[in-house]
Amino acid sequence: MERTITVKGTGKVRVARDLIAVSRTSESLDKDYEKSLDNASVKLAALEETLEEIGFEKNALKTSYYNVSTEYRNTYDKNGSSQSVFMGYASRQDLKLEFDFDTGTLSKVLSAVAGCISEPELGIRFSVKDKSAVSDDLLENAAQNARKKAEVLTKAAGVKLGELLSISYNWAELDLYSDTNYGIEARCLCDAPNIAMDITPDNIEVGDSATFVWAIA
């Protein structure tokens, strides 16, 4: 039976954020199915037009989630009996706008959206543009970390590290966002639409791991 050693290698990197991601959820409720969808489309068109006016391309705004469902509410009569009442068709669309990290551009986006009919309530997060490069660095670090652990363990045990037999990796999506979260409500945007964004988000710290199996002799 072949003798082996199994080691979990971990990689960690710290990278500077160079991307701003602005998210917006648009919702509509109406008893008429087509009207519910039309309401959502009107809000989206208004937001797209507003962004085009400040220099963004027509398709810069992306949809990350879209759903249409029926909504009911339980009502009770004087005898306590419940009845499910149809409230309408609820549509929800999650939208995302990404652009290079620039607080001046962020200020323009928020100021422009504040005057649009879309009733904006926005979420702002900070990320990186080249996500694959970060992932590659993490995996390289994990491999080096595992190799170093394996060499230390085999030397201490008086055996030799042999051929690499297998690598296991879960391929989970990395959360490449800064811990800094910036939220702003529609009322704040309307009250002070031209406010400057003087913020310095934290850099992004992320880790990943893989499991390595070597033969030992």
Image (cartoon, rainbow, N blue to C red):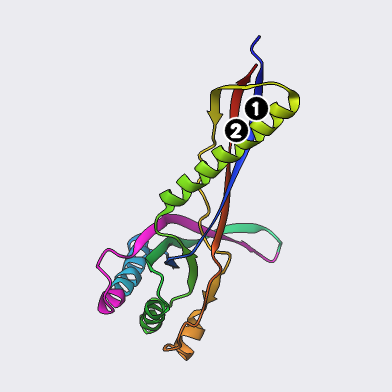
Which residue is found at the position 64% from the left and 12% from the top? 2
Single out the residue that lies furthest toward the top: 1
Say which of 84 and 128 sits in front. 128
Question: How far from the left and from the top, in percent, is residue 99?
Answer: 36, 67
Question: How far from the left and from the top, in percent, is residue 122?
Answer: 47, 72
Question: How far from the left and from the top, in percent, is residue 19?
Answer: 42, 65
State the residue position of label 2: 211
- State whether residue 172 appears in this view: no
Q: Quadrant of residue 154?
A: top right
Say which of 64 and 136 sits in front. 136
Say which of 179 and 187 sits in front. 179
Image quarter where the C terminus lies is top right
Q: 94 left or right of 35?
A: right
Which residue is found at the position 66% from the left and 35% from the top? 149
Image quarter where the N terminus lies is top right
Q: Tag 2's secondary structure? A: strand
Magenta includes 55?
yes
Single out the residue that lies furthest toward the right: 157
Q: Quadrant of residue 206?
A: bottom right
Question: How far from the left and from the top, in percent, is residue 96?
Answer: 40, 64
Q: How far is disc 2 from disc 1 in space, using C-alphas?
A: 7 Å
Say which of 169 and 137 sits in front. 137
State the residue position of label 1: 6
Q: Which residues are magenta?
A: 49-78
89 up-or-down from 156: above or below: below
Q: Tag 1's secondary structure? A: strand
- State whether residue 169 appears in this view: yes
110 up-or-down from 174: above or below: below
Q: Are marks 2 and 1 in contact (CB under 8 Å)?
A: yes
Amino acid at circle 2: Thr
Q: 25 left or right of 38?
A: right
Amino acid at circle 1: Thr
